[in-house]
Structure formats: structure tokens, C-alpha cells
Image (cartoon, rainbow, N blue to C red):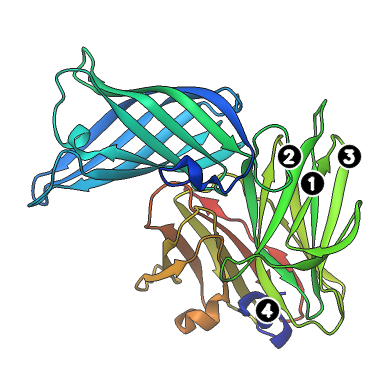
């Protein structure tokens, strides 16, 4: 699909929490939960720039999301003329249970908590905003920053968590399971998703949401167990240990190629992968579902002997992601990193040798780093294509 041949080049390169106010839920039904959180805070001051880097690492318990217990967040504060203790500082982070599922969020903190030693317990409001799909608000009316016996500042919060169920979900609050960073439909291409629960006593509600390059919903012709429809979202139930296959394709044979990404939401622990198929030749490639996003991804490329490499990125952070793309050549040649802004739910794909002509005839690695915030904002996939038109997926290394 992603070889230098014309058809392959086109296939790859064609190109919460609501902020502070519960009323931003747009009338979606909400499920009230309780939550508690305890997280020590580490602060490091750069004397030269008067910048404070701070991070939290602790535990959170939300009644409706029993698996989500790991809480981590990080942010920066620059103190300058006119700065005050009540200025709002933003931290970004993840609520997760290992690699099974992740909720990305942003948290607003008063700067006085970061820049000063407290010495005594302090209470204030704190707000946290989901970034993955705008599905709720944590409103901690009883946040407390205090200094423990080891002189470590600890954030303790207990309060209400109103979870807004997006789309077709009517029961448990869904989480973003992961994504398929590249989807191709039309121009002879179709993408098929295979979803399963290996061990399960209850079905999992699932939504597969397709987005175009600009982050807008991408409507396709779905063929699935519940029939054929044209829409941007497939929703249904996945029962273990069976497999549900859903096909995203063009409604008409004459439709031109469109590319984008798929974000997958679920109320259970679901496994999955996608298959790209170029129907005129029958060539296929399997790519795994990517789960929790990391700060950095690297993909090996090989542009020798007529082969080529394609890569794709999708932004799952809920806001614009600034991504640094760095390329290392063979042997050990490094090129300048270039920044790329990817919109919320957006998608970018390209053939490495076309975007970076200096890599023609070389092998190396291409690395993607989210500089907007360090935790959980992008997913990446890669494809190796031969001159014959055969193609296969590449390993993606996350850090």
C-alpha cells in the first residue's frame, strides 16, 4: 500500500472533562461517581530561567472506573513580573491501569501551590478535564495541598466525578482503548477491523470512530453484523471469545481514496487489529491496535533496493498536538527535526523518502515526539512496501 508506486503513494500520503464548566456537557446524560486522589508532588526549579517543572504521581479511585488507579501528571510554571499565586497553571497527565486503558486529562492548579512552600494545609477547588473524547468532569471541591513529614507537598482530593456517556454508550462510562493510526478507504482500498474479548463473562460496548486528516468525522460505508450503513461511527457489542469483523469501505467503486484514523472506545478490555486490503491485487497488511499512547515513537525505515516506508500519526490528546519529527540515516547520520501541528483527532501520513528526500537509498529510523505535552498524545504506525507492490507492517518502538 505504501510503496513508491503511484497507487501506494496515494494510499498513505493523500492527504471533558469539559473546561471548568459542567454546563459544557451539551446535555449529554451524566453518571455521578465519587472519586478520591492522593499524589505527592515533585518540584524542580531552574534558577537560570525561574521555571518550575512539577509532577504528580499517585493513585486515583473513581467509583465507575474501577480499573483506573494510576494517576500521573506533569507541567511547567515560569515565574515572571506580574505573576501571582492565583494564576492558573496547567498540568497534563494520564489515569491508567497499566497498558489496558488510559484516560488523558488536563488539570488546572493555582501557581502558588507550585512556586512556594506551603507549610500548612491549604484547601481550594481543583478542576480536571478529560481530553479523550470530552466525556466528563472531575470537580474536586475539597482539594488539599499539604506538606508531609518528609517535607513533600501532597495533593489530596475527594469529590464528585460526573461522567458523560458519549455516543451510544448507555451503561458504564467508556474509555479510549486506543487507535488504528491509519485508515484507507476508496481508490481500491478498504480497511477491516477485527475486535474480540479473549476472556469475558459480559459483552463490551464498543465504538469505532473514524476521523479525517483534519480531525473531522469521516463517513464511510460500514459492513458489519448489524447490517450495512454509511456513517462515521460504528457501535455495537463485542462478546468473548468471538470475533467481530467490521469493514470500512467506499460506498461506490468510483469513490476516490480517503485516509484518516480510527479511535476505539470501549467499556471492556477489547483486543483488536486492522487489515488494509488493496482489492485490485488482493494485497493485504495487518496492523495492531495501539493502546496507551507514549511520549515518543520510533519506526525503522528502509528505502533501499526499491523498497519504501510509509508512516502515519494520529492525535488522540483532545487538543492540537505539536509533533517533532526526527530522522536518523545510515550510518548514524542525523537530520534536523521538523515540527508539525496535528489537530485534535487529526491524522498525518507520508512516504518517508518523499517527505525526506535525503533518506533515498538509506536505512535508518524516524522518530515522532509530542512536544505539546509529554504524556499520551499520539499514536504511530508504519508500513514497508516492496517494488512489487507487496507490503507489510513495521514494528513501532514506544518510549
Q: Name the residue that disc number 4 marks.
A: 3
How far apart are the alpha carbons under marks 3 and 1?
A: 8 Å
SS at circle 2: loop
The residue identified by callout 1 is: 195
Residue 377 is left or right of residue 217, and the answer is left
What's the CA distance linking mark 4 and mark 1?
Answer: 28 Å
Would residue 35 appear left or right of 384 to someone viewing this image? Answer: left
Q: Closer to us: mark 4 or mark 1?
A: 1
User: Where 5 falls versus 83 (above or below)?
Assistant: below
Label 4 Cα crowd, 10 Å radius (few <14 / some 14-19 / many 20+): many
Alpha-carbon neighbours of circle 2 within 10 Å: few (<14), some, or many (≥20)?
many
Mark 4–mark 2 CB contact (< 8 Å): no
The circle drawn on residue 226 is: none
Q: Closer to the camera: disc 4 or disc 2?
A: 2
Q: Residues within 10 Å of mark 3 (few under 14, many from 20)?
A: few
Residue at mark 3 to residue at mark 2: CA–CA distance: 11 Å
Badge 2 vs badge 1, beta-carbon distance below 8 Å: yes
Query: Residue extending furthest bottom?
Result: 6
Tags 3 and 1 touching, CB below 8 Å:
no
SS class of the residue under badge 1?
strand
Find residue 4 and report its image quarter: bottom right
State how far apart marks 4 and 3 are (Cα): 34 Å
Which secondary structure, mark 4? Answer: loop
Q: Earlier in the sequence, mark 4 or mark 1?
A: 4
Amino acid at each position: 500500500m505504501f510503496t513508491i508506486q503511484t497507487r501506494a503513494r496515494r494510499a498513505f500520503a493523500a492527504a471533558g472533562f469539559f473546561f471548568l464548566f459542567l454546563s459544557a456537557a451539551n446535555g449529554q446524560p451524566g453518571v455521578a461517581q465519587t472519586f478520591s486522589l492522593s499524589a505527592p508532588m515533585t518540584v524542580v526549579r531552574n534558577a537560570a530561567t525561574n521555571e518550575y517543572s512539577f509532577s504528580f504521581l499517585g493513585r486515583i479511585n473513581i467509583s465507575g472506573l474501577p480499573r483506573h488507579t494510576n494517576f500521573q501528571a506533569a507541567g511547567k510554571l515560569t515565574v515572571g513580573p506580574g505573576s501571582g499565586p492565583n494564576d492558573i497553571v496547567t498540568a497534563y497527565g494520564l489515569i491508567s491501569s497499566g497498558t489496558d486503558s488510559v484516560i488523558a486529562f488536563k488539570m488546572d492548579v493555582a501557581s502558588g501551590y507550585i512556586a512556594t512552600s506551603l507549610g500548612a494545609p491549604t484547601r481550594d477547588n481543583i478542576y480536571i478535564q478529560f481530553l479523550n473524547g470530552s466525556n466528563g468532569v472531575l470537580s474536586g471541591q475539597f482539594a488539599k495541598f499539604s506538606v508531609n513529614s518528609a517535607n513533600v507537598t501532597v495533593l489530596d482530593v475527594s469529590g464528585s466525578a460526573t461522567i458523560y456517556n458519549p455516543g451510544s454508550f448507555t451503561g458504564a462510562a467508556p474509555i479510549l482503548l486506543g487507535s488504528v493510526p491509519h485508515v484507507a478507504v476508496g481508490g481500491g482500498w478498504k480497511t477491516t477491523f477485527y475486535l474480540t474479548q479473549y476472556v469475558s463473562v459480559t459483552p463490551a460496548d464498543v465504538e469505532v470512530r473514524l476521523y479525517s486528516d483534519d480531525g473531522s468525522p469521516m463517513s464511510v460505508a460500514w459492513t458489519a453484523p448489524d447490517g450495512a450503513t454509511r456513517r462515521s461511527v460504528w457501535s455495537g457489542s463485542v462478546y468473548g471469545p468471538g470475533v467481530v469483523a467490521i469493514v470500512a469501505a467506499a460506498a461506490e467503486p468510483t469513490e476516490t481514496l480517503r485516509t484518516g484514523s480510527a479511535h476505539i472506545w470501549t467499556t471492556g478490555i477489547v483486543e483488536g487489529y486492522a487489515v488494509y486490503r488493496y482489492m485490485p491485487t488482493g494485497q493485504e497488511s495487518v496492523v495492531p491496535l495501539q493502546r496507551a499512547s507514549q511520549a515518543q515513537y520510533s519506526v525503522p525505515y528502509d528505502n533501499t533496493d526499491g523498497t519504501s516506508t510509509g508512516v502515519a500519526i494520529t492525535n488522540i490528546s483532545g487538543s492540537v498536538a505539536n509533533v517533532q519529527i526526527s530522522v536518523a540515516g545510515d550510518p548514524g547520520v542525523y537530520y534536523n527535526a521538523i515540527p508539525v501541528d496535528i489537530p485534535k483527532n487529526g491524522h498525518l501520513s507520508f512516504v518517508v523518502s518523499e517527505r525526506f528526500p535525503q533518506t533515498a537509498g538509506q536505512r535508518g529510523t524516524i522518530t515522532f515526539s509530542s512536544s505539546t505535552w509529554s504524556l499520551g498524545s499520539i499514536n504511530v504506525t508504519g508500513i514497508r512496501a516492496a517494488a512489487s507492490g507487496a507490503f507489510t507492517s513495521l514494528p513501532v518502538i514506544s518510549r
